[in-house]
Amino acid sequence: MAKSQATFMKKQLEKNRQKKKEDKAQRKQERKESGSSAEEIAYVDEFGNLTSTPPTQKQASRDEDKKN
């Protein structure tokens, strides 16, 4: 007699879960090894535009004066 399809599907689903878990672990390891978080940082200038360069001290102190 043949095995039921339910058992086969359970095995296939478990294989898929395991593969996804391994892929996720591999992507996590790649992100950990690259370690380039500096590329992810963006700054906002006084006009509200995103820039890759940090604001100068002069601009930062001027913003603090406005808050007080």
Image: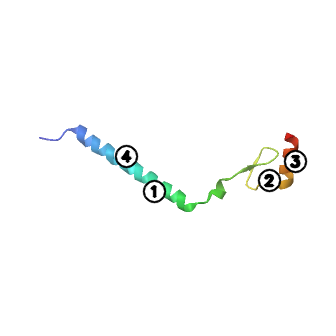
Q: Nearer the viewer, mark 2 or mark 3?
A: 3
What crowding class fits label 2: few (fewer than 14 Cα within 10 Å), some (14-19), or many (20 or more)?
A: few
Q: Position of residue 66 (x, y in %)?
A: 87, 41
Q: Amino acid at mark 1?
A: Gln
Query: According to the image, label 3 marks what residue?
Result: 62
Q: Amino acid at mark 2?
A: Pro
Distance CA(mark 2)–CA(mark 3): 11 Å
Q: Residue at x 84, y 55 (%)?
A: 57
User: Looking at the image, is mark 4 or mark 1 earlier in the sequence?
Assistant: 4
Most extreme residue toward the left is: 1
User: Looking at the image, is mark 4 or mark 3 earlier in the sequence?
Assistant: 4
- Residue 55 is labelled as 2
Identify the element where label 3 is drawn.
Answer: helix
Distance CA(mark 3)–CA(mark 1): 46 Å
Question: Compared to 49, does 31 lie above or below?
Answer: below
What crowding class fits label 1: few (fewer than 14 Cα within 10 Å), some (14-19), or many (20 or more)?
A: few
Q: Position of residue 22 (x, y in %)?
A: 41, 53
What crowding class fits label 3: few (fewer than 14 Cα within 10 Å), some (14-19), or many (20 or more)?
A: few
Q: Residue at x 37, y 46 (%)?
A: 17
User: Looking at the image, is mark 2 or mark 3 earlier in the sequence?
Assistant: 2
Q: Nearer the viewer, mark 3 or mark 1?
A: 3
Query: According to the image, label 1 marks what residue?
Result: 26
Residue 6 is left or right of residue 32, and the answer is left
User: Looking at the image, is mark 1 or mark 2 earlier in the sequence?
Assistant: 1
User: Looking at the image, is mark 4 or mark 2 earlier in the sequence?
Assistant: 4
- Count of marks placed on residues: 4
Identify the element where label 1 is drawn.
Answer: helix
Query: According to the image, label 4 marks what residue?
Result: 17
Q: Where's the N terminus, which quadrant?
A: top left
Distance CA(mark 4)–CA(mark 3): 54 Å
